[in-house]
Image (spheres, rainbow, N blue to C red):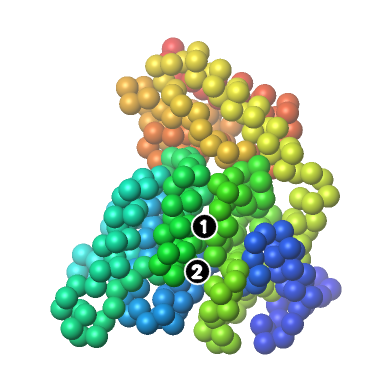
């Protein structure tokens, strides 16, 4: 290594500036904050939402997240993750971090009702000078751990309007679906909304640890010097990796490959599902993030089917107990998708025989 791979964030480094510029030029964002992982980027978004609410006079800020979501494993992000199985053993007096409420994904009426409830401060709290209010609605454009469930345009439009009407922030967690996996650069582009804040990691560094929180407009002005920081966030090594990923995406038309191979994968999985209707159900997802549901009476779980596929030399991952998740590389080739489908079908054939 001939160059410094870490420099204090007190100093400007060209790689960090160039990557921030690329992210902002290729999204709705005005500024970027760098960290080291998806959980850290979501932590930053949560802190930003709370500070933004505090600036509006809210003492008891509430962030809404969706049931079956996944936002990370730090204490705040695992609280934002509305899955009780991840909370077990981490509570205090039965409570996780306060200030989070959960709502069913893609249920517009439930979301509206919850916002109305949050914006009513309990009488005893009001007498004590406290004010409860909506800080943010934080959603994945497509739920990954929740079973490969894409958001609907109607639901996200409702979330956008509720945030606008209440001075709150719309946050999109793009850690899994962002950086091209959906077939567009950002998953929220599939839904026709612009968030105030969105987060990225995973594919951003092409295997090198990096995370980023992007913000636009007033949200981009919330943090001042010292309000939030990361020792290694935005280091030259990680940002150089991010720039290499960005350059490759831009120069090799990767998004077209994602869409074409994604269509091929969906079509193949749907054909296999038709041939094994007692085992497989709906195929859903975007781009190269696809899931196939396992029937309730299939006689196996998603994890067991993933194990069967591994024996055939195919690496998959479960998305909950009843969905098998396919997340191939964005540069995957046509013949490789064909091979993956053949191996998956072979695993199912052995399972049912």
Q: Which residue is mark 2?
A: 45
Is label 2 in a helix, a strand or a loop?
helix
For the C terminus, give its image quadrant. top left
Label of residue 173 in the image? 1
For the N terminus, give its image quadrant. bottom right
User: Which residue is most to the left?
Assistant: 124
Q: Residues within 10 Å of mark 2 (few under 14, many from 20)?
A: many
Asked whether 197 or 250 is in front, the reply is 197
Residue shown at the point (75%, 44%) measured from the top left: 254
Residue shown at the point (67%, 87%) measured from the top left: 10
**Looking at the picture, how far across and down is residue 82, in whole percent?**
35, 54
Asked whether 11 or 194 is in front, the reply is 194
The first of marks 2 and 1 along the sequence is 2
**Looking at the picture, how far across and down is residue 53, in whole percent?**
41, 76
Q: CA distance from mark 2 to mark 1?
A: 9 Å
Residue shown at the point (69%, 55%) measured from the top left: 206
Residue 304 visible (yes or no): no
Is label 1 in a helix, a strand or a loop?
strand
Q: Residues within 10 Å of mark 1 (few under 14, many from 20)?
A: many
Q: Are marks 2 and 1 in contact (CB under 8 Å)?
A: yes
Q: From the viewer's perspective, is residue 326 above or below residue 11?
A: above
Residue 278, picture quadrant = top left
Residue shown at the point (47%, 64%) measured from the top left: 164
**Looking at the picture, how far across and down is residue 350, in whole percent?**
48, 17
Residue 9 visible (yes or no): yes
């Amino acid at each position: 290594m001939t160059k410094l791979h870490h420099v204090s964030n007190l100093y400007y480094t060209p790689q960090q500036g160039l990557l921030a510029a690329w992210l902002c030029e290729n999204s709705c964002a005005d500024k970027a904050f760098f960290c080291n992982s998806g959980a850290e980027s979501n932590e930053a978004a949560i802190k930003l939402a709370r500070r933004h609410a505090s600036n509006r006079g809210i003492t008891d800020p509430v962030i809404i997240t969706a049931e079956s979501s996944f936002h990370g494993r730090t204490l705040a992000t695992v609280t934002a993750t509305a899955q009780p199985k991840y909370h077990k053993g981490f509570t205090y007096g039965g409570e996780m971090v306060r200030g989070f409420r959960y709502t069913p994904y893609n249920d517009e009426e439930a979301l509206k009702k919850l916002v109305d409830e949050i914006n009513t401060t309990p009488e005893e709290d009001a007498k004590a000078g406290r004010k409860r209010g909506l800080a943010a609605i934080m959603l994945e454009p497509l739920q990954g751990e929740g079973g490969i469930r894409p958001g609907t345009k109607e639901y996200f439009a409702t979330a956008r309007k509720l945030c606008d009407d209440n001075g709150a922030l719309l946050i999109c967690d793009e850690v899994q679906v962002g950086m091209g996996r959906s077939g567009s650069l950002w998953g929220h582009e599939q839904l026709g909304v612009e968030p105030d804040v969105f987060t990225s990691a995973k594919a951003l560094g092409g295997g090198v640890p990096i995370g980023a929180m992007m913000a636009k407009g007033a949200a981009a002005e919330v943090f001042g010097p010292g309000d939030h920081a990361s020792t290694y966030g935005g280091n030259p090594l990680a940002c150089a990796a991010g720039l290499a990923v960005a350059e490759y995406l831009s120069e090799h038309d990767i998004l077209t490959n994602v869409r074409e191979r994604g269509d091929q994968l969906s079509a193949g999985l749907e054909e296999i599902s038709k041939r094994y209707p007692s085992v497989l159900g709906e195929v859903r997802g975007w781009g190269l993030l696809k899931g196939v549901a396992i029937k309730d009476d299939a006689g196996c779980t998603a994890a067991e089917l993933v194990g069967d596929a591994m024996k055939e030399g195919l690496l998959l991952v479960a998305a909950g107990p009843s969905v098998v998740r396919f997340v191939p590389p964005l540069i995957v080739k046509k013949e490789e998708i064909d091979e993956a489908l053949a191996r998956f079908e072979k695993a199912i054939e052995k399972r049912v025989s």
